[in-house]
Amino acid sequence: MAPFSPEKLLRDRLGRPPGVLRLSLTARCNLSCPYCCPDNKEPEGLLSDTERVELVAVAARLGFSKLRLTGGEPLLHPSLVELVRHLAGLRRDGLQEIAMTSNGQRLTPLLARDLHLAGLDRLTLSLDGTTAGSVARMVAPASKNSRGAHCLEAALAALEAARDAGFEPACGRLKLNAVIIRGRNDDQVVPLAGLARRVGVELRLIEAMDVGSRNGWSPSQVISADEIVRRIAAVWPLEPMGRATHATAARWRYRDGQGLLATVASISQPFCGDCNRLRITANGIAHTCLFSAEGSDLRQPLRAGPDVLRAALETIWSERRDRYSEERAARLQSPNSAPVHPEMAYLGG
Ligand code: SF4
């Protein structure tokens, strides 16, 4: 069969092609991490699963060949396995990959197996600490260590369940995410790297970002990717592999051959220049940037049929000019432009 090629070469105002569609299934979450601060309210007018599949089909034909299911916490979506099964039927429309980011708290061995069989290609699990205390500090303000112990145990069990189900870390199908916040969990940088090396998964360490308006972010909370790498390399020497085009993460190889590390340096080394991501909220609002306050409602075009939806997506993408992370420093210094950001729980990070 001839390889799929998009219907036309769509480019945004900065010449960037479409690539990744990040589709939020819910704004609810079963954790309350301080960088996200979900309010556990669903937005009005959630899309149906049928609408989600139609949207992804049209987007895939325009060049959004990779799909990432997000939340909130996507495992709270009641018909997730069924949805993945339908989405997997879109390979003929150009959808090459279905990935999901999850905190893993609800990932049982059975669910992991069902998701793998349904066609989920990649799974990234989030875990921001390696001890009961550090996890408690990250999953809910003022929560007890026993809650942290429970969440840690569930996340480790999820890693095992995912690997056993066929999400093979050596092929990049299973990864671990951690957001690092100075003063809250930065003592976990080296322990997290050690844990990931032990269980054989690639760890992606993410700089704390100014997402939303509730998380109280300040530049002083950021541990730069350079500092993260320095700390880890002091224990396990690393060599750089660079950042692939359109990727968010720069990758590193452990010199002793014990796997890979990645850093996502949205603050210290922005990568807007080749950003190819479009985010869709659980109720069908498209945001062309994690930091774009204004979204475009896709529900009416979606309900008007594929041609109208395709035209709407083409317009949204061709008018896109976002590069917030590259402009952040200047914007934060300007007294008249206090940024208004949508909440991460709605946009899926
Ligand atoms: S700030 Fe916006 S444009 Fe830049 S990389 Fe992030 S999502 Fe893409």
Image: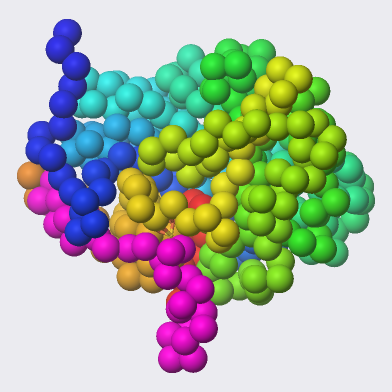
- The residues colored magenta run 310-339
Residue 89 seen in this snapshot: yes
- Image coordinates of residue 127 in percent, x first then y, are 72, 41
Q: Is residue 16 left or right of residue 201?
A: left
* Quadrant location, the N terminus: top left
Residue 90 seen in this snapshot: no
Residue ID at (20%, 26%): 93
333 falls in the magenta region: yes
The residue furthest top is 1
Residue ID at (46%, 77%): 330
- Image coordinates of residue 43 in percent, x first then y, are 44, 62
Q: In terms of depth relative to the viewer, which is nearer, 166 or 230?
A: 230
Query: How many numbered marks appear?
Result: 0
Q: In the rendered image, which quarter is residue 176 located in?
A: top right
Q: Is residue 163 left or right of residue 24?
A: right
Q: In terms of depth relative to the viewer, which is nearer, 188 or 296?
A: 188
- Image coordinates of residue 153 in percent, x first then y, are 82, 34
Q: In terms of depth relative to the viewer, which is nearer, 53 or 61?
A: 61
94 falls in the magenta region: no
Image height of 104 relative to 324, above or below: above
The residue furthest bottom is 336
Q: In terms of depth relative to the viewer, which is nearer, 147 or 267?
A: 267
Residue ID at (72%, 48%): 228
Residue ID at (48%, 56%): 270
Q: Is residue 314 left or right of residue 253?
A: left
Q: Quadrant of ligand 1?
A: bottom left
Which secondary structure class fits the magenta region best? helix
